[in-house]
Structure formats: structure tokens, C-alpha cells
Amino acid sequence: MPRVGWVRVALFWLPAIAAVSIGCGGADFVPPPADMAPDDAVDIFITKGDLPALAVAIIDGGQTLYTKVAGIRKRGDATPVADDDAFHIGSNTKGMTALIAGTVVDQGLLTWDSTVGDVLGGTVDVGGYGAVTLAQLLSHSSGIPEYPSQVEAAIDAETMPVVEAQRREAASAALALPPASVAGTSFLYSSGNFVIAGLMLELATSTSWEDLMAQRLFVPLGMTHAGYGLPGTPGMVDAPWGHDPAPIDPGTPDIAPGAGPAGTVHDSLGDLIAYAQLYLDDGVGPNGRIISDAALTAMETPRLANYGFGWMTGRSDTGVLRMVHSGSNRRFYSLMILFPERQGAMLMLTNDGTQQSWDRVDQVASYFAAHFGLPPKGPWAS
């Protein structure tokens, strides 16, 4: 698993994003100093760092210290981003799916040790993965490899109108792949794990993953701009367009809805703040508890390669618990860094999915960590 800077597990599928250098924001870009005012720093990251738009939130001690949404929705168009604009968050969807899994475990409808065979047997062909557990799926230790490019293309091109049928097809495609390792012995990042886990949640609750997300996360947390797939209307600039690095119309096909549990959510910065706050408040939402302490502890516990359930997790070199994940559909990029024990977080969204944008957002994170005195980068605990 490649990891540079904060974390490098963002891609929904296997192919890497090629590095690019555009405009004046290439390798010669100099990040702003830590003592620069945040608004000025964000302006530099956009105007000189070649990010079309950037949304940032900084939380510490349970208080939101800074938020900013700036830039444009589409290169070549002057329409500015709005505070409530939604951005695609890619694989940061995985943490949401893991959290929903925790609520299902809290109900007693599944356990972390529930197996693929016990839950999915008779619904799809589980192949050689019948003994794989929900915990192994959510921690990428099932042995299931990432989808090959030709399988990914077939899934993304799927036109079945019913999402449930698409999800079963996507799960079946992952279960048909030869195992790369014995379950529980190796870490291998694979979006197929979360597609399969999502299908398990659906069968255990008799509720679609989309409805589970809405009922157990979006509505209770007031995430009013959250949804699935690309934000915006095809042909219109009513939401941020993704870039690669040229703008891509939101009507251009994206990740198949059936693969949703692994990476199709979009939300606004305000939505992401509400979601992050749930971890910082020990699973309690605005109207009461959403997930138990025990389930959150299971999510935060490092397993192979310091991956918990839907999060890279471990202690920094200064001893601070840190949870990190990034996400990209190759058009947008998101980075979430949580410090649950000090009720802190750094949240960043941009509408550019190139490798350069990943590197730039790493620099954004470094600037804000230094500016606000949040824990610096450091090696993950082994």
C-alpha cells in the first residue's frame, strides 16, 4: 500500500492517478508559512497551488476554530463555490459504512465475527470466502484483492436500473476473484471488501445501504446536503465540477451506484463537520447516542498495517490517537484527520482529483496543523 504524507489509500479502484503539473502550481509551489493568516493561506493554495476550490474545517477541543469554502466550481467559469456546496468524498465513504456496521452490531443483527457464508450464502456465490468475517472485510484483511481494471470497467458500465441488483453484481465480482492471501494474515486495500460488507448490512437489516445511511447517519446528524454520486446537474454549474485536471461534466459516468458502500457519497463541509463531530463526541449525536462506545473502540483499534474499520488509525510519535482517511473518484479529493482524544479534526475537500491535488492538500494539512498547534505528522504506531 503506497503511503506518502498523511495517507495514500484514497483511490476507489486500483489504477493510480498520474502526477500532473498545471499552470503555476507545479513543483515550484511554496506553501505558506505557519504564521500566515488562514484566509490568506487558503487564497495562496487556490491561486498559486492550482486548486479550483478548497473547503477546510479545523476543530479542536470540540470547538470549530476555522471554516472556509473558497474558489470556483469549474475551471473556465467564474461561478464561486458556495458554503453548502457538496463535494464527492470517495473512499471516505468507507468510514461511514463501517460506522453503520457498528450500529447494526449494536442492534445484535450481526457481530464483527459474522461470516460472509452465514450472511450471504444462498444469495450470492461466496466462493472460497465463506469464512471471512465482517471485521476482516472492514479492515481489508480478508484476502480479497482489488478489482482488476477490466472488472472495474464492467461494474462501472453496469446499467441495471435497480441498485440492489448492481450491488449483488459488484459483490459477486469481488467474491469471484482468487484470494491474494489467507484471510486474517495480510492487509490488502480492496474496495470489494466494503461492497460485500454493505450487502451483508442490507441482508441483516432488510434495508438498502442508501436508506441505512440516511436513517442512521445523514438525518440524525443533520447532513442535509449529503447524497450519492456526483453532485450537480449535468450541463449546469450548480455544484462543483470534478477535474482531472480539466473540468468533467457531472453527467459523465462515474463509480457505479452498486459499489456505493466503498465510495460514492458526496457532502458539504458542514455535513462533514457534523459527521466528524460524532467521533469526537464518543458516538453521541445532536439527539442522542448513535453508536456505542464499544463499536467505536472496535473501529478505532489498529489491526494489520494500522488499519481499523474504515480508517487508518494509531498513535502519532507524540502519542496522540489519530484517525486518517482520504478519498478520490479521480475528480474530487477529500482528506479527514481526526484526533478523538482531544476532540480535534482537520477536514479538507477539493474538486480536483489529480495527484497534484493530493500533494497540495497534504500541504494544506501541514499548514493548518502548524498554524493551530495540532499534532504534527509522525509514524503510525506498529
Image (tube, rainbow, N blue to C red):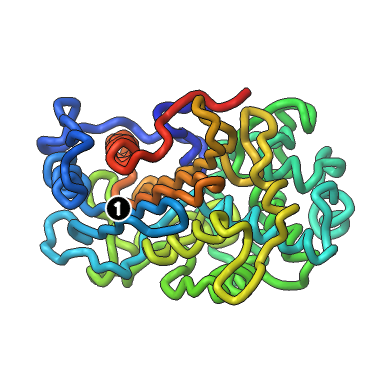
Quarter of the image for residue 80 reads: bottom left
On screen, residue 273 versus residue 283, left or right, reads left
Packing grade of label 1 (10 A; few <14, some 14-19, many >=20) is many
Position of the N terminus, as image quadrant, is top right
Is the residue 18 above or below the residue 118 in the image? above
Task: List x then y, in percent, for residue 133.
Answer: 81, 44
Instruction: Give the percent coordinates (x, y) of residue 194.
Output: 64, 49
Res. 152 image quadrant: top right
Q: Secondary structure at mark 1?
A: loop
Asked whether the viewer can see residue 260, the reply is no
In the rendered image, the quadrant that contains the C terminus is top right
Q: Residue at x 77, y 69 (%)?
A: 205
Residue 305 placement, left or right of 232: right
Up-down relation of residue 237 to residue 64 (above or below): below
State the image coordinates of residue 179 (x, y, percent, origin top left): 74, 31
Whether residue 197 is situated above or below residue 175 in the rendered picture: below
Residue plotted at (86% across, 49% down): 117
Task: Residue 87 in the image: state x and y as whole percent.
Answer: 36, 59
Question: What residue is disc 1 on?
Answer: 351
Residue 85 visible here: yes
Identified by mark 1, the residue type is Asn
Count how many numbered circles sit on residues in the image.
Answer: 1
- Is 264 in front, or is 112? 112
Front residue of 321 and 219? 321
User: Which residue occupies the foreground of this view, 143 or 270?
Assistant: 270
| Residue in view at x 26 percent, y 52 percent | 54
Judge from the rendering whether residue 317 lies leftward or rightward of residue 328; answer left or right. right
Residue 142: image quadrant is: top right
